[in-house]
Amino acid sequence: MGICSKGVDAMSRRRCCGHIDEGIVCQTFIPQGQSRWPEVIVQLEELEAIRLKDKVGLDQVECAASMGVSRATFQRILGGARAKIATALVEGRPIIIRGGNYMVKNRVFECLGCGQVWEAEPCTVGGKHGYEIACPKCGSMKKMKLDKGSKQTCSGGHQAEQGKGGCCGGNS
């Protein structure tokens, strides 16, 4: 799996990194007008918990499995995220998304030539873009990205930045 950002304060026990599927689209939400309140920091694994439970609609057992944490840990992450977001919305505070204990999941590809399935690091943590990756078995550049049971065609360009999915992530 990708890179782990282990942030631990002195009073808490070390927790496993939560796995996240993709990078974020927007890191900052600021209420219209002047905000005199301090910003609310939402960590990336907290955003992933919100995405899996509230956007994708998975149950907590599925969410916990997707993130590679226990159900109880998932519940704590989700509860913390919801409390932070509620505070920001009710008090008109800016939301900043950054940091946390997480690993970006690897991308999974299937070669259209030989059927080989393999994983590759996300391009956001130093891996190659999907269109730059050849099959490790036969060298073919013709592949599909496997994503939660669906297949996405890989083509040129960094499609995640354009919101079109593809081999670099971002299919939400």
Image (cartoon, rainbow, N blue to C red):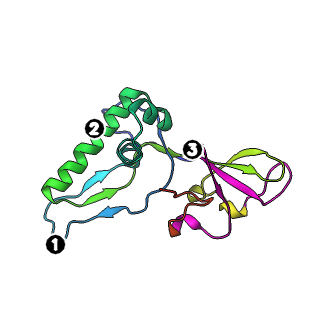
The residue at the point 16 percent across, 66 percent down is 35
The answer to whether the residues at label 3 and label 2 have Cβ atoms under 8 Å apart is no
Cα–Cα gap, marks 3 and 1: 40 Å
Cα–Cα gap, marks 3 and 2: 25 Å
Looking at marks 1 and 2 on the same chain, the residue that comes earlier in the sequence is marked by: 1
- Judging by the rendered image, the residue that carries numbered circle 1 is 33
The amino acid type of the residue labelled 1 equals Gly
- The disc at residue 91 is none
User: Is residue 34 at all visible to an observer of this figure?
Assistant: yes
The amino acid type of the residue labelled 2 equals Gly
- Judging by the rendered image, the residue that carries numbered circle 3 is 148
Numbered range of the magenta stretch: 133-161
- The disc at residue 79 is 2
Dividing the picture into quarters, in which one does residue 158 lie?
bottom right
User: Is residue 10 at all visible to an observer of this figure?
Assistant: no
Looking at marks 3 and 1 on the same chain, the residue that comes earlier in the sequence is marked by: 1
Residue 103 in the image, given as x and y percentages of width and height? 51, 44
The residue at the point 43 percent across, 62 percent down is 25
Name the element at disc 1: loop
